[in-house]
Image (spheres, rainbow, N blue to C red):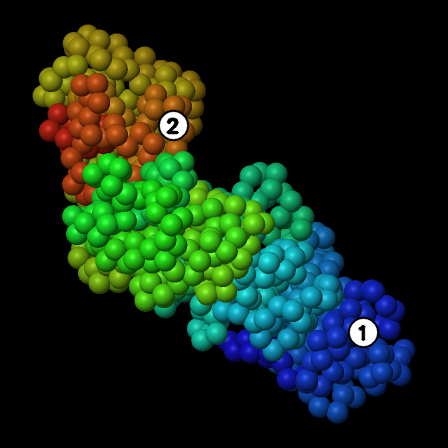
Amino acid sequence: MRDLRPLLAPTSIAIVGASSRLNTVAARPLENLQMMEYGGALYPINPTAQEIAGIRCYPNLEELPEVPELALLVLPAQHVLPTLESCAQRGVKAAIVISAGFAETGSEGAQAQVKIREVAQRSGMVICGPNSLGVLNFVDRIPMTFGSVTDMKDWPGGRVSLVSQSGGLLVGLANRAFDAGVNINYAVATGNEADLKLSETIEYLAEDPGTDVIVVIIEAIRNGPRFLSVCDRLLELGKPLIAYKLARSKKGKAAAQSHTGALAGSYPVLQAVFRQRGVIEAGDLDDLFALAGACAAGRFPTGPGLGVITESGGAGAIVADRADDLGLTTATIGKDTASRLKEFVPQFAPEQVTNPFDVTSIIAQNPASVGSMAEAFFDDPAVGGLLVITAGSGEPGKARMQALLDPIQRSKKPAFGVVLAGSSATPSYQLLRSNNIPAYHSPGKAVESMAALWHFARARERHKARCKSQEKTVASEAKVKEALAGIGSAPTEYDAKRFLKQCGLLVVEERLAQSAGEAVKYAETLGYPVALKVQSPDIIHKTEVGGIRLNLDNAKAIETAYEEILTRARKAVPQADIAGMLVSRMVPTPLEFVAGIHVDPTFGPLILLGLGGIWVEVFDEAAMCPAPLIPEDVLEMVSQLRGAALLKGARNMPAVRPEEIQKLLLTLSEIALASQGLLSGIDINPLVPTEDGRLMALDASLFLAHP
């Protein structure tokens, strides 16, 4: 890992292309640094000026009295490369290229950007950009940008770092963070990423002792394995990564390409990575710093059960509804907790104490009592985190929040305050935030943040299990490679299912026939009725060429179908190499699934599971998860399917045993890892449940990787 300190906190800065023309891109970096009273040496470089803003100006890098740690380039694009060459020759450690006109402009700009990368690789210099808005260091007050930072003096340094591939969002988001009570330490706009990439920046900040939480704006992940590795490291360190993905749709993707020259990857694949690796995804920019504030408090739920103290029954109902949507629940409190809370219930109230705990009249009379209530909830093992909902208006509202401070600070469980009122509750809201307690105006948003923390906590546990797990699934690496070696260079459906069977999966009984007579013999062995399917590596979609006949129940029907299929296949694909006809036992298909392996060009092998048949059109979804999988990942995948209840059996359909789903997906995971570089994918479609709850492959395809 390279040292990014010279980029983030340089002791001296050369501004190449500095200008004295006020309010221009070339003038603002020096103006910003002077305004923030930067304590290091500043060296404006412009061959046509003697001094700029009262500072001596130099004609070039070679004439500087010392080698600056950082060069900030605000030059026309055609001058960037020779300037970087000069920086490399002088031994400059880092550079920020604000200049645009590279990969975002087309092939010529992309070629110039490649040369920038070559300079960095050859010299070891860290280059941020091109087309970068710059870098902001709030800890040391160093604004290395042309953006407006007039309020930077009022923004204290914090423990949240911000990395954005969209430079235009950088300064605005930093401002919004501080408005939300979240203090930033570093903010980096990586731009076109000729050299310094998003993943490397996150990797460095992960090890930074001053960073507890990292917020990222993502247009594209360029190095999937490195991103996965840094996500794992963040889980080990207990530092949450909060992401907002730009360019989710096709139109958004096109906008990202024009903006930074980056091709954004598949959004569903990235979501699968986020789920497995504990990355907290923000649905909107407005959510970023509410999530960051919750994470920065440093407390994570011990379970999915929420304790709720509320002045509003309606707000409590909102919490319960939103919790159900997000995989949380309102905890069923224990007898001891109920007994402790009972003392705060008026005599006229019902005997039973429930959660959410509605305390409208109680804390109005005794604001301090909310502290004792919170302690009771914290002590309950069923409660993983606590929400306290109050109108919060005026001094009474502030007194209630004040009573919460000590119990919350003593507890290791997270607690959020929800202040329902607006401006009249500002003192309550600010009291919570000033004490590092996440505060919200919306009960639903508070639940979303708690769910995000629970997602991260669970991902940490799954990561530990993944690291400890050394067990092999049914398909060992040696077995997979041996099975692959026997299928040849052009596998048919028959080869694919034979391979899956060798790896331990259940496939339909079938035989490969070379003649009509042989097909009849096999049908009589398997038992009528049977299906007949043409086998050729050149015919992937057999139905389209009339290559399938189903429910054949006698010898004559098989002989006729054999000749008809052969004739149609040869007419449709004259050059097809036909390996024979597959004779398969007909199997009932009350419920169909699809499963397989997809090798993503960025993140590598992913395991897929979805509902097939008519349910494809109804649900149009598939759960994905990067390999390797552990049993907890399988449970997560199944829970993602909206039709997951069908697996338990519905309308006389057979139920699928959970261990069979686990066996299927873990075996595919093992195959995916063992076949890297050999297979580009596997499709099993359809996959059907048997009467005894197993899963049987009726059709499958293997896709070999090309060198």
Q: Residues within 10 Å of mark 1 (few under 14, many from 20)?
A: many
Residue flagged by tag 2: what amino acid is it?
Phe
> Who's the residue at 22% across and 63% down the image?
468
> How many residues crowd mark 2 within 10 Å: few (<14), some (14–19), many (20+)?
some
Q: Nearer the viewer, residue 257 or 642?
A: 642
- Quarter of image, res 79: bottom right
Viewer-proximal residue, 518 or 552? 552
Identified at 34% across, 39% down, the residue is: 320
Q: Which mark is residue 617?
A: none
**Residue 271: % across, % down:** 43, 46
At mark 2, the secondary structure is helix
**In the image, which disc is placed on residue 18?**
1
Provide the residue designation for mark 2: 619
Tell me how far mark 2 sits from mark 1, CA to CA. 57 Å
* Circle nearer the N terminus (2, 1): 1
Between 659 and 373, which is closer to the camera in this rendering?
373
Give above or below for 594 relative to 222.
Answer: above
The residue positioned 17% from the left and 25% from the top of the image is 654
Q: Is residue 230 left or right of residue 629?
A: right
Residue at 37 percent across and 16 percent down: it is: 546
